[in-house]
Image (cartoon, rainbow, N blue to C red):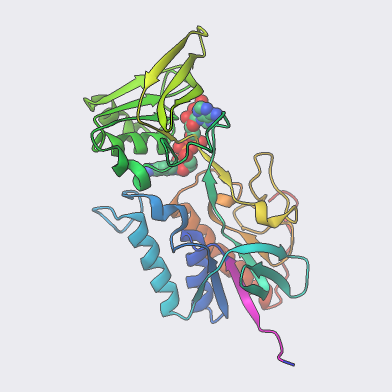
Amino acid sequence: MNEKHVYDMIIVGGGPGGYTAALYGARAGLDIIVLEKLSAGGQMALTQQIDNYPGFEEGIDGFSLGEKMQKQAELFGGKSEYAEVVGMDLNADPKMVETDTGELYGKTVVIATGANPRELGIAKENELIGRGVAYCAACDGMFYKGKTAAVVGGGNSAAADALLLSRIARKVIVIHRRDTLRAEKIYHEPLMNAENVEFRWNSTVAELLHKDRLTGVRLKDVVTGEESIVECDGVFISVGRKPATGVLKGQLELDNSGYIAAGESTQTNISGVYAVGDVRTKLLRQVVTAVADGAVAAHMAEEYLAGGAQELPANP
Ligand code: NAP
């Protein structure tokens, strides 16, 4: 009977955190594999322009940066496999990761599954996806050339989406439940100065109006309670992210917002299991903080494999 192969490190998710763990792990001589569902880069691959990752003074698109990170890890022996992870047994010895193509075994596991767009949770939202409801301006913005697009949210994602759409659409309407943007200051001026960007402050989307596709949204003013209708061809929902932890099925401790409870050490409540990037509890979810996590996780895994004592933090 064939003995099962046991990797030193299985990395679940090929975003910046995952591929940095792969780079550091491979350079340390570990036998590693990265499991990625779609393409290298994760959510980053959907970002058209990244201007705040050091070393690229003219910025770089997220897809190219993802490919570069993958190539760099592979150069040192890090392997990738395109497969969807459907389950895990993190308490087993060795740890087991089940994909749609079979089971893999590892002495350590790095969870780098990131976070997915959060939904508004209103009627018809799911049914209208692709027919006027969208979550990614970099992916679907081109369908709104010369049209009217609304953007819901006031954070960095909503601001970046609105700016991107302002260069494609005829008109962009930002719908935000507060009277001021939460987005970083760098976005405020270009958005306020864009001639085709309008704001609907203190407003939430009460209803998606549609025939065979979206025709507009009914807004509710959160201060006065008044309702109004905004006609638009598309609505981009940019109201944050939710951590991709479904596949863990309760095996790891999560914080109150559903992120994996792991601090700067990336150590989770299970020995030999580390959480990196957007999926873990952290102050700032950026490419640059995800890559830092990846390096730390690889270092932690290396020590763990070498038999170094690692205390599980009481409060990570
Ligand atoms: P975010 O910062 O959490 O902002 C979410 C926005 O959506 C907030 O303005 C929030 O309103 C609003 N919102 C949440 N739930 C809502 C609901 N049910 N209905 C209406 N509005 C709702 O999320 P994000 O903008 O997606 O950013 C996620 C992370 O990625 C952040 O750490 C961000 O800094 C990072 N990011 C960075 C960049 C960049 O640096 N260039 C670009 C994109 C994302 P309130 O303000 O009222 O809470």
Magenta part of the chain:
2-11
Residue that extends furthest to the bottom in the rendered view of this protein: 1
Magenta run includes residue 3: yes
Question: On the image, which quarter does residue 276 sit in?
Answer: bottom right
Which residue is found at the position 36% from the left and 42% from the top? 137
**Which residue: 70% across, 47% down?**
254
Image location (x, y in percent) of residue 45 = 40, 56
Position of residue 16 measured from the top left corner of the image (x, y, whole percent): 46, 60
For the N terminus, the quadrant is bottom right
Residue at the far front in the pictured view: 212
Left or right, residue 267 beside residue 117: right
Give left or right: position of 71 versus 21. left
Residue at 57% x, 29% y is 123
Asked if residue 200 shows in the view, the reply is no
Q: Main secondary structure of the magenta part?
A: strand
> 184 or 135, which is in the foreground?
135
Res 237 seen here: yes
Percent across and percent down for residue 87 are 69, 62
> In front here: 273 or 304?
273
Which image quadrant is residue 164 in?
top left
Whole-percent x, y for residue 56 in the image = 28, 57
Q: Residue furthest left?
A: 195
Pick the residue in front: 145 or 78: 145
